[in-house]
Image: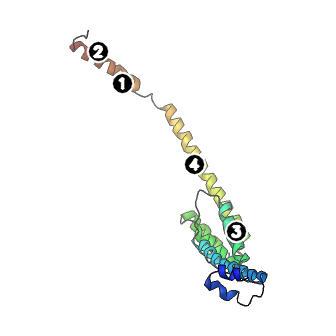
Amino acid sequence: MELMRGAIEYGQREHVQSATSSKEMWDHLCQFHVTQRQDTNMHYYFQELYLRKWDEHTSMFDHIRSFLNLKHRITETGHKLEDILVIYAILHSLSHSNIWDIVKRNLLDKGKDLTLDVLTAELISVHDYSEHDYFADEKNKKAKSDQTALFTKPSSSLNDSKKRGKKAKHLDKGKKPRT
């Protein structure tokens, strides 16, 4: 037991003063470090909850799942986190664009009827719809450019090569042949 007291830092000794056995000392140290780590982790969890931003390359499902995971980790530290705070954090994380601003306003107008399930369903459906529109627009643009390429006159590279051939012959006449 004295060996353990000698191995710990001076600031930790006050937590194990009343210990009468090595096991009791170990239990006090574990509780002290776990509690201290949980408080520190909780601070970082809340920081991540309010500073996280949605990267448009990730799916909305994964983005919302990361918030629910943070909520679970905060709850594990012994603190209660209301769903409305998670909802506000998710809405705050969305990008500032016309479509997302309208979606945020519509969701916030629901008031007390707004739950995590409603929020999740709405955000995923809007994201999927907008992503589908984006890919449809890209597909239409590609099809139009392909059609335009088919109906335009052939490139003048063939004509340019004929002209270059004439110029090359004309220049060769003025030069003496090499031996």
Between circles 3 and 2, the one closer to the viewer is 3
User: What amino acid type should be assigned to the residue bearing mark 1?
Assistant: Asp
Judging depth in this view, the residue of 147 and 159 nearest the camera is 159
Q: Quadrant of residue 58?
A: bottom right
Q: CA distance from mark 2 to mark 4?
A: 50 Å
Judging depth in this view, the residue of 81 and 112 nearest the camera is 81
Residue beneath disc 2: 169
Question: SS class of the residue under badge 3?
Answer: helix
Q: CA distance from mark 3 to mark 2?
A: 76 Å
Question: Of the numbered discs in the image, which one, if any, rests on residue 117?
Answer: none
Q: Name the image quarter holding the C terminus.
A: top left
Between circles 1 and 4, the one closer to the viewer is 1
Q: Farthest top residue?
A: 179
| Residue neighbourhood size for the residue with mark 4, other residues' Cα within 10 Å, grouped as few (<14), some (14–19), many (≥20) | few
Q: CA distance from mark 1 to mark 2?
A: 14 Å
Q: CA distance from mark 1 to mark 4?
A: 36 Å
Judging depth in this view, the residue of 71 and 152 nearest the camera is 71
Q: Residue at x 40, y 26 (%)?
A: 157
Question: SS class of the residue under badge 2?
Answer: helix
Q: Residue at x 73, y 76 (%)?
A: 76
Give x and y (percent) for residue 7.
66, 78
User: What amino acid type should be assigned to the residue bearing mark 2?
Assistant: Lys
Residue beneath disc 3: 69
Residue beneath disc 1: 160
Residue beneath disc 4: 137
